[in-house]
Image (cartoon, rainbow, N blue to C red):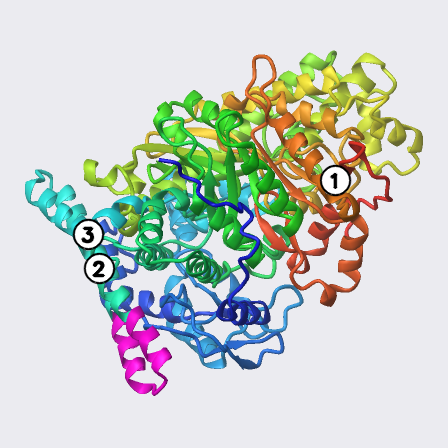
């Protein structure tokens, strides 16, 4: 049966409905409001049940906790008010087609004191006034957090429990002034970050089963398996599954009950009918199988809010919704029960619901993560498990909804398999990037599938991949990858090599790692590379050691029965996800500063050891001086004609890029995680390349003190004049080394006067990048900002003129106005290409924070 029946793939006649327009206007008007509902309920239950300080919390302990929260949440059918930028309430003049919300507010900030929620404790009195991305917090809620919530978690958060655990293992003392070195390195903020102190998200649940059998079917299966289980731990696990699912059922019923109450209060016939329909839907799903497209979307949404009560909103993603919901959509359309207009309105309402919250980011965190949403990725297109074209009508409807809404969440990712998916589909994806300026990101199925199978996934599992968080691929609903487990600053490895185990951020004389040789002792570049590998190995050991300790802490106190219920593997194994219940277990590392280190290594190889233009100790003196008085040296280091640069198809630099990726893949692959899986390496940076750059001194590639590092796996800005060469260099890296995903960020100059020609060139550039080179699979991922340099500069000076300017950061979309100045400058300074000529556009780069 032909899957695409649309005559107009662009769905150009579809517009935002009046309802969607009003909700969208309110969305952009609202500021996020800190929500105290979850922390108050979680803290009260934990206090009353004696969970604080308890050394082990079982899945059943957590399931009962979450059932309590779900059954006692405020059943919000519609938000009457939001809070505006003036911190005053305003009326929301429309009702969504979906009941419930992630928090109790129109646009909320969910709070997890178990993780990093306490980080905003010092800000409670001024969080409304902070300069960057302020939150509204009611005075009454300040008192709740100060008195009823935060004091109970001082020693009970994941990070503090882990600190205690590591200190006991090292010295036998629970706390003291001598923390584990890995914890000390984390708190320096310049070596690596680990996400498990803030979440254990970064995965995709399996919605297909709950759509097919409903939560009642999952409950009955768990009860049957529990009766047959031989081990007490398994029986408790299955009981936990049933408890958690009953909580979600109760929550949806409460929403239905509230909708019926509201229907009884209105005399408007249309409003009454709408509320009664909403009540009917929520009374049926997600308890029972979805029978319609709307019931399917509601099932996904209600389960999604439940998942976000259990796990922080960081990188949890929805997967291949165009695949799991397609049959329901097609059935309704063929039965005449659903029009395209209605389907688009439902999708737009769901998109707004998905974006109804932002993660909790303290003021200091704005320097590393400023402007980020919660990175809830949706994946469309590509091939199915049999390798057939999976693009369907719903794919195009989801693309159109994204184009209409221009929201940072959900983060749309589009898969494309050249030769299997139709060329018209790729053209449509490129067209949407021109229209939105920033979305969707494009993923090469051929390269991604090859990367996943190289790490042990079956071909069927790999073909059914979705994107997690930023750009990380994983098999839909069966891959528990914790893809942001480690964020490693590779430039600190270079620093430790140059300074013999010391780092300028921590000061001279402070030995951080191990002595691998004074600068004057390296007789050859090979000797320098050997020292670099030793330092990289040391850093990988430290980062993974901390990740493992945090993982064991999760096993002690933070099982995930809700997510485990909606996943392939735990039911069959009788085991929670954090104990290895998933079908595929791994951990992800992402590397920050890749291109800067490649170019720095190339500079050391060429300028120091081959040309002998300067000795390594003298180069280090120039770095310490931030190149002041070293104009000739700086010009040489920055000139790609004199010093090889990654992204120019120069063999010296590109071979170092391959060596570096191979080295890092090998160092991480030898590690086994706490769930029995292996580590996978990726190259995406969120905004960490700006934050880490701000804390780091000058580097041998000519980058000065405090300047940004380059995002993802993108070549350094300003050194790659040819678009074709830049794409070929990146695409030459073997996909098997990049299984945790890559972000390649390009900036194109809009050409509205010759739009069709620009679109032709856009499509050709993607096809060329994805085209497999001899012995390779082609480039893995690519994403775009189609906005001029001058527009971005003006947006810094006049942010009020660009409230909805959407940009690609490094793996996710954000609003340019929300980014910190360092990150704004990085986007401004990115190489901008004219697609008509394929050449870089000349403009002045400051390289410094605006």
Q: Residue at x 43, y 48 (%)?
A: 316
Report, in whole angstroms, how far the alpha carbon at label 3 lies from the one at label 1: 51 Å
Of callouts 3 and 1, the N-terminal one: 3
Name the residue nearer the viewer: 598 or 469: 469
Reading the image, the residue beneath label 2 is: 64
Can see residue 594? no
**Which sits earlier in the primary sequence, circle 2 or circle 1?**
2
Looking at the image, is mark 3 or mark 1 nearer the viewer? 3
Residue at point 68% right, 27% down? 727
Q: Secondary structure at mark 2?
A: helix
Magenta residue span:
254-278
- The residue carrying mark 3 is 240
Is residue 183 shown above or below 272?
above
In the rendered structure, the answer to whether residue 9 lies left or right of residue 639 reads left
- Kindly state the secondary structure of the residue where label 3 is placed: helix
Point 45% across, 26% down: residue = 449
Query: Could you say where residue 741 lies in the image, as x and y percent from the top left?
Result: 52, 33
Mark 1: give few (<14), some (14-19) or many (20+) Cα within 10 Å. many
**Residue 258 on the magenta segment:** yes
Q: Quick check: is 260 in the magenta stretch?
A: yes
Tag shown at residue 729? none
On the image, the x and y values in percent for residue 746 come to 69, 38
Q: Looking at the rendered structure, which numbered label has been put on residue 697?
A: 1
Front of the two marks 2 and 1: 2
Residue 303 location, x and y as percent?
32, 56
């Amino acid at each position: 049966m032909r899957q695409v029946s649309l005559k107009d793939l662009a769905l150009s006649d579809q517009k935002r409905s009046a309802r969607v327009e009003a909700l969208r206007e309110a969305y952009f008007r609202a500021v996020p409001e800190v929500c105290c509902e979850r922390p108050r309920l979680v803290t009260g239950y934990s206090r009353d049940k004696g969970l604080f300080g308890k050394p082990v919390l079982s899945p059943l302990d957590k399931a009962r906790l979450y059932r309590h929260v779900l059954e006692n949440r405020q059943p919000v059918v519609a938000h009457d008010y939001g809070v505006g930028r003036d911190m005053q309430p305003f009326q929301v003049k429309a009702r969504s087609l979906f009941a419930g919300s992630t928090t109790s507010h129109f646009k909320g900030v969910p709070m997890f004191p178990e993780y990093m929620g306490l980080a905003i404790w010092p800000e409670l009195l001024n969080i409304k006034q902070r300069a960057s991305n302020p939150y509204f917090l009611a005075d009454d809620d300040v008192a709740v957090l100060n008195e009823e919530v935060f004091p109970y978690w001082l020693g009970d958060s994941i990070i503090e429990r882990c600190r205690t655990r590591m200190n006991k293992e090292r010295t036998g003392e629970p706390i003291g002034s001598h923390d584990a070195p890995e914890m000390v390195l984390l708190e320096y903020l310049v070596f690596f970050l680990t996400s498990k102190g803030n979440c254990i998200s970064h995965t995709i649940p399996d919605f297909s089963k709950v759509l097919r059998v409903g939560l009642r079917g999952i409950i009955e299966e768990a009860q049957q398996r529990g009766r047959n289980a031989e081990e007490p731990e398994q029986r408790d696990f299955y009981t936990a599954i049933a408890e958690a699912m009953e909580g979600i059922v109760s929550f949806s019923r409460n929403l239905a009950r509230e909708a019926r109450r509201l229907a009884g209060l209105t005399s408007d016939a249309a409003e009454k009918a709408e509320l009664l329909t909403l009540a009917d839907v929520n009374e049926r799903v997600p308890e029972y199988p979805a029978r319609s497209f709307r019931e399917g979307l509601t099932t996904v949404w209600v389960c999604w809010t439940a998942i976000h009560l259990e796990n922080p909103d960081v990188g949890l993603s929805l997967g291949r919704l165009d695949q799991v919901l397609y049959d329901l959509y097609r059935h309704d359309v063929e039965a005449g029960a659903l029009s395209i207009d209605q389907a688009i309105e439902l999708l737009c309402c769901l998109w707004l619901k998905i974006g109804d919250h932002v993660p909790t980011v303290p003021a200091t965190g704005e320097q590393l993560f400023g402007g980020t949403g919660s990175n809830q990725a949706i994946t469309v297109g590509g091939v199915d498990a049999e390798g057939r074209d999976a693009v369907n009508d719903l794919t195009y409807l989801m693309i159109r909804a994204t184009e209409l809404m221009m929201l940072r969440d959900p983060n749309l990712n589009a898969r494309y398999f050249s030769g299997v998916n139709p060329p018209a589909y790729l053209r449509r994806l490129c067209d949407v990037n021109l229209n939105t300026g920033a979305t969707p990101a494009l993923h090469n199925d051929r390269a991604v599938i090859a990367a996943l199978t190289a790490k042990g996934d079956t071909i069927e599992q790999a073909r059914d991949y979705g994107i997690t968080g930023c750009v990380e691929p994983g098999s839909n609903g069966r891959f528990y990858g914790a893809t942001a487990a480690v964020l490693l600053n590779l430039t600190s490895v270079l620093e430790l090599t140059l300074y013999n185990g010391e780092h300028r951020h921590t000061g001279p004389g402070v030995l951080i790692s191990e002595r691998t040789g004074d600068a004057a002792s390296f007789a050859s570049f090979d000797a320098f590379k050997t020292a670099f590998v030793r330092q990289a190995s040391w850093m990988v050991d430290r980062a993974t050691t901390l990740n493992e300790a945090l993982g064991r802490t999760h096993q002690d106190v933070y099982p995930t029965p809700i997510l485990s219920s909606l996943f392939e593997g735990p039911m069959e194994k009788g085991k929670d996800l954090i104990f290895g219940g998933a079908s595929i277990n791994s951990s992800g590392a992402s590397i920050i500063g890749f291109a800067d280190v490649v170019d720095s290594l190339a500079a050391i190889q060429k300028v120091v050891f081959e040309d002998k233009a300067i000795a390594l100790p003298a180069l280090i003196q120039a770095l310490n001086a931030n190149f002041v008085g070293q104009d000739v040296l700086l010009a040489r280091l920055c000139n790609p004609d004199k010093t090889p640069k990654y992204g120019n198809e120069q063999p010296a630099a590109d071979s170092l890029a391959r060596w570096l990726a191979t080295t890092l893949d090998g160092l991480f692959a030898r590690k086994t995680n706490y769930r029995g899986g292996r580590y996978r390496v990726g190259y995406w940076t969120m905004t960490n390349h700006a934050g880490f750059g701000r804390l780091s001194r000058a580097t041998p590639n000519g980058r000065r003190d405090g300047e940004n590092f380059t995002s993802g796996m993108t070549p350094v800005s300003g050194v790659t004049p040819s678009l074709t060469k830049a794409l070929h260099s990146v695409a030459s890296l073997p996909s098997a080394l990049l299984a945790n995903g890559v972000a390649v960020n390009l900036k194109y100059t809009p050409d509205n006067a010759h739009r069709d020609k620009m679109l032709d060139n856009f499509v050709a550039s993607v096809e060329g990048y994805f085209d497999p080179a001899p012995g390779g699979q082609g480039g893995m991922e690519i994403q775009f900002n189609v906005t001029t340099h001058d527009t971005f500069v003006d947006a810094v000076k006049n942010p009020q003129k660009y409230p909805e300017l959407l940009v690609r950061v490094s793996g996710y979309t954000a609003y340019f106005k929300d980014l910190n100045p360092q990150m704004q400058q990085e986007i401004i300074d990115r190489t901008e290409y004219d697609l008509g000529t394929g050449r870089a556009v000349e403009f002045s780069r400051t390289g410094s924070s605006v």
